[in-house]
Structures are given as C-alpha cells and as structure tokens.
Image (cartoon, grey):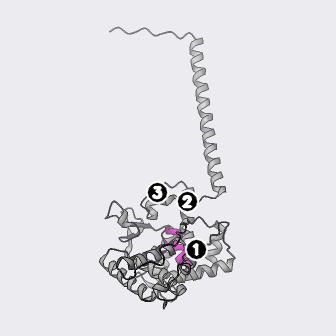
Amino acid sequence: MQLKQLVSDFLAWLKVRVKQGTNAPRTLDYYSDHLRMAQRFVGGKTEVADIQPFTLAMWATTWHRWQVLQRLFNWAQDLEIISTSPAARLEKPQRGERKRILTRPEEVHFLRAAKADFREFVIGMRESMARPQEVRELRWEWLKQSANGHWFFALDEFKARRRRKDKEAIRIIPVTARLSRLLSRIAARRGRTGVVFLTRKGASWSKETIRGRIRTIRRRLKLEKDRRGENVVAYTWRHTSATAMCTRGFRDKMLAELMGHTNTKTTARYQHPPPDELLNTFNEIHSNATKAAKVSEDLVDQLEAIVKRLKEGGHKRQPEHTW
C-alpha cells in the first residue's frame, strides 16, 4: 500500500468519527494538515513497507509531527493494514513551550505592517485572547449579550470540552471595547451573518494563509528569532495578551476560564512577564509593604505613649455603682 492511500483511509476513518461526535472537526484539520506535509516530504507514492525510519526522523523533528506519525501507523497496525510501523523506533522529540511575547512597539509595528483584512484578524486574537483557530471559526450567531450588557461569543464546541467536569459548560470569549468597535465596522460593511473574520476576497482564514501573512510581516519588519530560537507566530498574540493580563493582577482561575483552560497549570505556561514588569511589580509591592510597616510602627509608638501617660498621671479607678 502506498503512503497516500494509507493517509486517505485514515482521514476517511477520522471523518466518520467527527460526524459521530467522537472527535472535534479541528482534530481532522490537525491531522489532515500534518499528514499532507509528511506525505509531500516522504513521497505519496512510496510504499509503506519501503519507508525508512531515517526518512521519517528527518521530518518528525517536532513533538506534533512525531505524534501524528505514531497515530497514523499505530492505527494501521491495530487494524492489521500493516504488520510493522516504520515509526516505531523514532525518538520522541521534547515537547517545546512557546515563551515569546511581543513588546508594545512590536505590536504597533506589526499591526501597521498588516494588510487591512489581516489586521482585523490579529486584533481579534489580541483583544479576545482566544486560540487562533477559535478566532478563525467565530460566527455572528455566537455573539451574545449578558444581563449586564456585556457582549461575548458563546462556543458550545471547543478544545478540552470533553475533559471538563461540567459537560454543559460553554466557552466564553469576551468582547472588549476595541473589539466591539471593530465588530461594528465589519457588520456595517457586510452584515452579521456567517463567519466574522474573512479575507478581503470573502474567504475564511486558513492556517496556511495566516502563516504566510505572518512570514511576510516578519520579513518586512525584520523580526528575527529570539535567543531561544522562537519566531513570532499566531499564538504569540495569545501569549502576549495573557501576560499583559497577568501583570495587571488578573487572577489565574479567572484567566484560565477566559482562555478556555481546564486548569491553571496550563494558563501559567502563557505568562511570561519580562524583567522590567517583574521589577516594577516587586518595587510597587515592596514600597506598599514599607509604607504599611511604617504606619504599624507609628501606631505602636502612639499606643505606648498613651500607656505611659496613663501610668504617669496616676489614673484613678472609678467607683463601682450600687443599685
């Protein structure tokens, strides 16, 4: 069997699971994108039996690529489509964590360099702290208003929903004042139906299109990789916004809910306050603590002075009343 046929059969099986509600649609997109890249690298017409582990190792340099290959070949092996997996002995890459955030000047320059349609999409990511794929899929019919007059998007299907204890919980994506103004302009231009953020040609944003736009902006602004070798990507905006909320004193539990996380440990990975922010916060807390300590010392001095005066004045005890 050729690799392209195996990939096609696996995606067809996964598509059935999506229709049954076992897997989310974005899971199909995830495997489809990665497996097509693997197919181009290895060669779609290559017989699975002839695939060399070395070839797969050259492509599976990240945890996600490694995971996709393991899932494909293990599935085929479990169904006895193949006898052995060519990816069985591939070394598991360390799962990296994004840590890069944008400085305020970088945010401004990035938005100015983006074309109008992509600028709207980026503002949507920045203001909502939502995942890029969530912003891509936002629809007007999901826009709701709370009893207090606050606007938000309500998602019934979202990442990690099945891991939540409350299976009926919805994913809330808040609408800030800036995002509200942007939504008003979009609605005035093309109405409030369908997907919210579209390209200038009226198409939905794809992962490839977003990656391409970001690459173009990186080259234009000469945004190099940071000292860890990390580039600016779509998720950088989510990390930047989460870090900003953290430095403003937003509680982890509340931030986790707004970001769609099931626990605060995941949210902690999105908080990367720069040294200046850490030092400013420390100095502010230290200054407040020093002032509080000084007030406490003054109160103690005042109490001691009162006690001393009472002792020196020979305070007389008042006679008890007899009724």
Q: Which residue is mark 2?
A: 271
Query: Which secondary structure class fits the magenta region best?
Result: helix
| For residue 320, side relative to residue 293 (left or right) | left
Percent position (x, y) of residue 251?
Answer: 49, 54
**Magenta stretch holds residue 131:** yes
Which sits earlier in the primary sequence, circle 2 or circle 1?
1
| For residue 110, side relative to residue 198 (left or right) | right
Residue type at the position of mark 1:
Val
- Badge 1 marks a residue whose secondary structure is loop
Alpha carbons under labels 3 and 2: distance apart: 11 Å
Camera-side residue: 320 or 117? 117
Can residue 138 be seen in this snapshot? no
Q: Which residue is mark 1?
A: 233
Can residue 274 be seen in this snapshot? yes
Residue type at the position of mark 2:
Gln
- Badge 2 marks a residue whose secondary structure is loop
Q: Residue at x 60, y 40 (%)?
A: 289
- Badge 3 marks a residue whose secondary structure is helix
Q: Quadrant of residue 55?
A: bottom right
Which sits earlier in the primary sequence, circle 1 or circle 3?
1
Looking at the rendering, the stretch of residues picked out in magenta corresponds to 118-132
Q: Which residue is mark 3?
A: 264
Alpha carbons under labels 2 and 1: distance apart: 16 Å
Camera-side residue: 86 or 231? 86
Residue type at the position of mark 3:
Thr
Q: Residues within 10 Å of mark 3 (few under 14, many from 20)?
A: some
| For residue 10, side relative to residue 50 (left or right) | left
Q: Residue at x 58, y 78 (%)?
A: 58
